[in-house]
Amino acid sequence: MKTTKSLFGTVSIIGVGLIGASLGLALKQAGIVQKVLGVGRSKENLDQAQKMGAIDGVVDLVEATKQSDLIVLCVPVAQMRATFEVMEPHLQAKTLLTDAGSIKGDIILAAKEVLGKKACQFVPAHPIAGGAQHGASAAKIDLFQGKQTIICPIQENSPEDIALIIGFWESVGSVVKQISSVQHDTLYAAVSHLPHILSYALMASVVNSEDADQKLSHVGAGFKDFTRIAASSPEMWRDICLGNRTAILKELDQYLAIVNHMRKLIAENDGAGLEKLFNKASKARQDLDGL
């Protein structure tokens, strides 16, 4: 891969939504790329990304694979395997791959099965950044600034390629941490995937009630804060739920046990029990703000 400390050559972003377009803006601002190419399904979205300066040009996936020094996969996780399949015949030995997927196990498996020996060129990553809105129009140039990016290298990655990908994500402001893919999927089932599921569930519960319109006309800040992430991409979160289902089901079962316990306390008019549980949760949440 042709690169120096300040230059990553031609970078292609596959999927120019919130994450992809924000990455393009940040890379251009950092001045560490020669050119950013965009690949996507929606001409309107790609036009928007180019108009706002997130990408320099639009190409198809085959051309992006042939032309790039580094490729960032920002497609929904269920599309990763098909994306690898199109790329594999055209993937140059000089080209590095990374991604922004919210799960790692299924993506790594797909990469190894489809890319074979070329899988060593793929250094999996997950930037812990995003927002409720999606599409290039929601992009923010500082989206990654001060936010964690988790990398989960595979055994086949060389130390040099790992270092290059760490430097790439650091160049857009990320604080990079390295953990295993198994640990990643277990941790993020609890602190990312479960909160999104619960947000969708509460929104669905209210919307499906007989007096939904009346309830929604009286919502306050608490309800809006809790359900903000239910505006996220349904396609993306469908794929995450199915792709990390084992870890998510474990977290859901634990959450449901807590909810059932709370229901029992309320049904039994156990104020002391409720306060004890709330105090423990409240203190943990306050401590979180100090981290």
Image (spheres, rainbow, N blue to C red):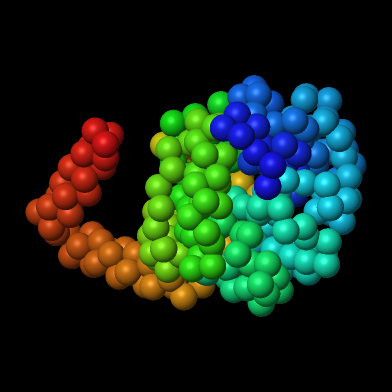
| Image location (x, y in percent) of residue 232 | 61, 46
Please tell me whether residue 13 is drawn above or below residue 209 in the rendered image.
Answer: above
| Image location (x, y in percent) of residue 236 | 64, 56
Which residue is found at the position 55% from the left and 46% from the top?
165
Which residue is found at the position 77% from the left and 25% from the top?
53
The C terminus lies in quadrant? top left
Query: Farthest residue in the left direction?
Result: 272
State the image quarter where residue 289 is shown.
top left
Please tell me whether residue 143 is drawn above or below residue 113 in the rendered image.
Answer: above
Which residue is found at the position 60% from the left and 29% from the top?
6
| Image location (x, y in percent) of residue 266 | 23, 59
| Image location (x, y in percent) of residue 43 | 89, 42
In the picture, measured across the screen, residue 44 lies left or right of residue 129, that is right
Please tell me whether residue 282 is drawn above or below residue 90 in the rendered image.
Answer: above
Compare residues 59 and 45 and report the one nearer the observer: 59
Please tell me whether residue 149 is drawn above or below residue 182 in the rendered image.
Answer: above
